[in-house]
Image (cartoon, rainbow, N blue to C red):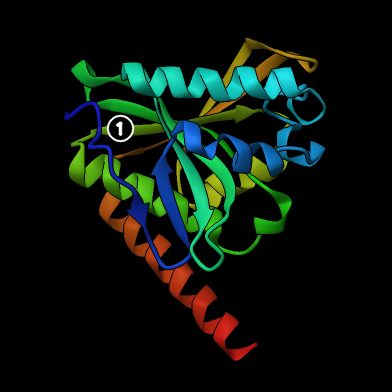
Amino acid sequence: MKWPPPPRPLEGGLVRLEPIDPAHREGVEAISRDADTWAWIDRRVPGDQAAFAAWFDARLAATRAGREWCFVTHSLAGGEPIGSSSYVNVRPEHAGIEIGWTWLHPSAWRTGANLEAKLLMLDHAFDELGCMRVEFKTDARNERSRAALAALPTTFEGIFRKHMLTPVVGVRDSAYYSIVDDDWPEVREQLASRLSRRAEAAARA
């Protein structure tokens, strides 16, 4: 597995994922104030500038050190940031990685932005970085996230009970999902097909 990734953006038809940079701070902070965005991540961020700064600085430092790799998600149409997603829990010795810290401003929900961002990051992980396994986890109570992961599709692997202590929320059970390299060709085809159908529907609207 190749790590860290090359410092370049990933671009599709809807979104452009740029490696996090200090220049992103102002634009990302401006879209981080909706409480729904952070309900299952860190509920302190929307109303606390210091909490946002701590989140942003942690992602920047981890990316620079190669412990994680954070992308800032931009709308290709407007050019503005709409969210973020990261490679985390990197295990180069086992060719494994997690896609996490994923959030989008509600204005980008149900637009295909998350779907395409996942396709770009999965394609990069399997076909360029050489991953054997990509995993995802979410709060077991987060039905919206779990439905989205099941629809990718991923394989549900179970619940880690009392897995984490989450700010404000408290004790969290985590639902784990994965895609492995054997799954990837079929998953990629399904993702590409879903995006194509969405684009066709948008063109007819």
**Total tally of numbered discs in the picture:** 1
Q: Nearer the viewer, residue 203 or 29?
A: 29
The residue carrying mark 1 is: 133
Seen in the picture, residue 144 relative to 162 is either above or below; the reply is: below
Across and down, in percent, residue 41 comes to 67, 27
Q: Nearer the viewer, residue 52 or 110?
A: 52
* Left or right relative to 140: residue 194: left
Q: Is residue 156 visible?
A: no
Seen in the picture, residue 69 relative to 184 is either above or below; the reply is: above
Across and down, in percent, residue 166 comes to 70, 14
Across and down, in percent, residue 142 comes to 71, 35
Residue at 54%, 53% (x, y): give it.
114
Q: Quadrant of residue 180?
A: top left
Image quadrant holding the N terminus, namely: top left
Image quadrant holding the C terminus, namely: bottom right
* Structural crowding at the residue carrying mark 1, measured as other residues with C-alpha within 10 Å and reported as few (<14), some (14–19) or many (≥20): many
Circle 1: element type: strand
Residue at 79%, 18% (x, y): give it.
169
Seen in the picture, residue 7 relative to 96 is either above or below; the reply is: below
Q: Nearer the viewer, residue 151 or 48?
A: 48
Q: Nearer the viewer, residue 173 or 28?
A: 28
Residue at 22%, 37% (x, y): give it.
6
Q: Is residue 110 visible?
A: yes
* Left or right relative to 66: residue 76: right
Across and down, in percent, residue 131 comes to 23, 34
* Left or right relative to 63: residue 182: left
Q: Residue furthest bottom?
A: 204
Residue at 23%, 33% (x, y): give it.
132
Seen in the picture, residue 59 relative to 163 is either above or below; the reply is: below
Instruction: Name which residue type carries label 1.
Output: Arg
